[in-house]
Image (cartoon, rainbow, N blue to C red):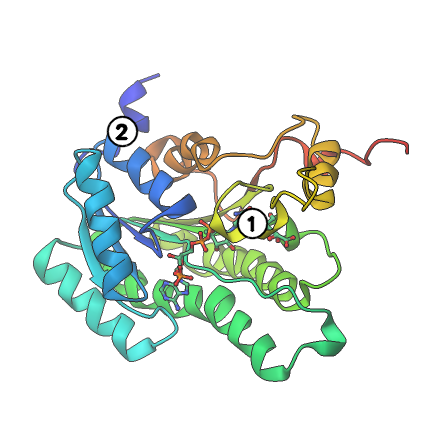
């Protein structure tokens, strides 16, 4: 096998919401594999923070302010990226939010907001890049899904609904555009230590570990939280020619959570 199939040399990769966290780690890996990095985030402060962090790693990233829920802004940004950098070969729909609120206390507006960022935005951004991918003859779209694409738990009804929907959007993009040589796959991260999950790992007043932290470690065969770096290898694989016949698949990177019924108390 030609190991260059794993290379991303000459490719342009756009990772949404990638100033820090999982998106940043994926972008870092893509740059190491040879790709040119484009990212956006919701405000200038985050983009500047991201640009500085990429620079520190020796990566010349192209950073833009763009709210991925705003279709007009996304369409304009795609035109700008194509003019300033080139046609996007690899899109990672990473930007996401969570609201942990019991369902009967959650307003419809809060529910809609989560669906808007975590499900409608991947539709909006994918729709904006697919026409140029078709013209170019290839494209890779990677949607960042979740354990909640498969499982439920208290307080995350909107997030689970969105990430479950994102799994099916992934399969539908594969179904509609596979013939155009576009591969659309998902990555389902397990519990990853990032600012998004920091409240679930906060130390208790007495210095002991958060009960949810203990619960996740006991529920994960790997017996630890994941790190953003754990997602790098799978993300490079799904962006590279090495995965050209992998389509509509959700690759769970969860230390084994979905395989495991849990420890007997
Ligand atoms: P994060 O630390 O919260 O980063 C997400 C980024 O997206 C932030 O920079 C955020 O900006 C940005 N963003 C939010 N709304 C946006 C919008 N409308 N337009 C543009 N950017 C926007 O999250 P993460 O933990 O790295 O997670 C990244 C992705 O992985 C998310 O889709 C998340 O659901 C998913 N995921 C995370 C875990 C985990 O355990 N951490 C597990 C499974 C899946 P702000 O800082 O302003 O919010
Ligand atoms: C939660 C978590 C999750 C994770 C992740 C799991 O409150 O249960 O925040 O939903 O972030 O998406 O894969």
Label 2 residue near ligand 1, CB within 8 Å: no
Q: Marks 1 and 2: which is nearer the front? A: 1
**Considering the numbered disc 1 on the image, is that residue within a helix, a strand or a loop?**
helix
Q: Is mark 1 within 8 Å of ligand 1?
A: yes
Residue 28: percent from left, percent from top: 29, 37
Q: How many marks?
A: 2
Quadrant of image for the N terminus: top left
| Residue at the image position 56 percent from the left and 49 percent from the top | 197
The relative height of residue 256 versus residue 128 in the rendered view (above or below) is: above
Give the SS element for disc 2: loop
Quadrant assignment for the C terminus? top right
Mark 2 crowdedness (10 Å alpha carbons): few <14, some 14-19, many ≥20: some
Residue 238 in the image: above or below residue 172: above
Q: Which residue in the structure is indicated by mark 1?
A: 197
Callout 1: few (<14), some (14-19), or many (20+) C-alpha neighbours within 10 Å?
few
Which residue occupies the foreground of this view, 32 or 222?
222
**Which of the numbered marks, if any, corresponds to residue 87?**
none
Return the residue found at the far right.
265
Q: Seen from this angle, which residue lies furthest bottom?
A: 108
| Residue at horizontal 20 percent and vertical 46 percent from the top | 52
In front: 103, or 30? 103
The structure residue drawn at horizontal position 61% and vertical position 36%, both measured from the top left corner, is: 254
Which residue, as the protein is rendered here, is positioned at the far left? 84
Q: CA distance from mark 1 to mark 2?
A: 31 Å
Residue where numbered disc 2 is placed: 7
With 108 as the anchor, is 139 left or right in this view? left
Which of 176 and 203 lies nearest the eye of the viewer?
A: 203
């Amino acid at each position: 096998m030609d190991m260059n199939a794993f290379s991303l040399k000459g490719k342009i990769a756009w990772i949404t919401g990638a100033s820090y966290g999982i998106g940043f780690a994926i972008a870092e890996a893509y740059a190491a594999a040879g790709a040119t990095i484009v990212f956006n985030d919701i405000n200038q402060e985050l983009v500047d923070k991201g640009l500085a962090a990429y620079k520190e790693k020796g990566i010349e990233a192209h950073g833009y302010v763009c709210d991925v829920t705003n279709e007009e802004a996304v369409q304009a940004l795609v035109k700008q990226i194509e003019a300033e950098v080139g046609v996007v070969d690899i899109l990672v729909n990473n930007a996401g939010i969570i609201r942990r609120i019991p369902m009967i206390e959650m307003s419809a507006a809060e529910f809609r907001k989560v669906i808007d960022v975590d499900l409608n935005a991947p539709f909006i951004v994918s729709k904006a890049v697919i026409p140029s991918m078709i013209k170019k003859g290839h494209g890779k779209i990677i949607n960042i899904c979740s354990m909640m694409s498969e499982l439920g738990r208290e307080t995350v009804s909107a997030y689970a609904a969105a990430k479950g929907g994102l799994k099916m959007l992934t399969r539908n993009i594969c179904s509609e555009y596979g013939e155009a040589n576009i591969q659309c796959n998902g990555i389902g991260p397990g519990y990853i230590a990032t600012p998004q999950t920091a409240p679930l790992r906060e130390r208790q007043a007495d210095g002991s570990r958060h009960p949810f932290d203990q619960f996740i470690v006991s529920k994960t065969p790997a017996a630890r939280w994941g790190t953003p770096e754990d997602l790098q290898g799978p993300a490079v694989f799904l962006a590279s020619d090495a995965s050209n016949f992998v389509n509509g698949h959700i690759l769970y990177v969860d230390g084994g959570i979905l395989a495991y019924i849990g420890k007997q108390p």
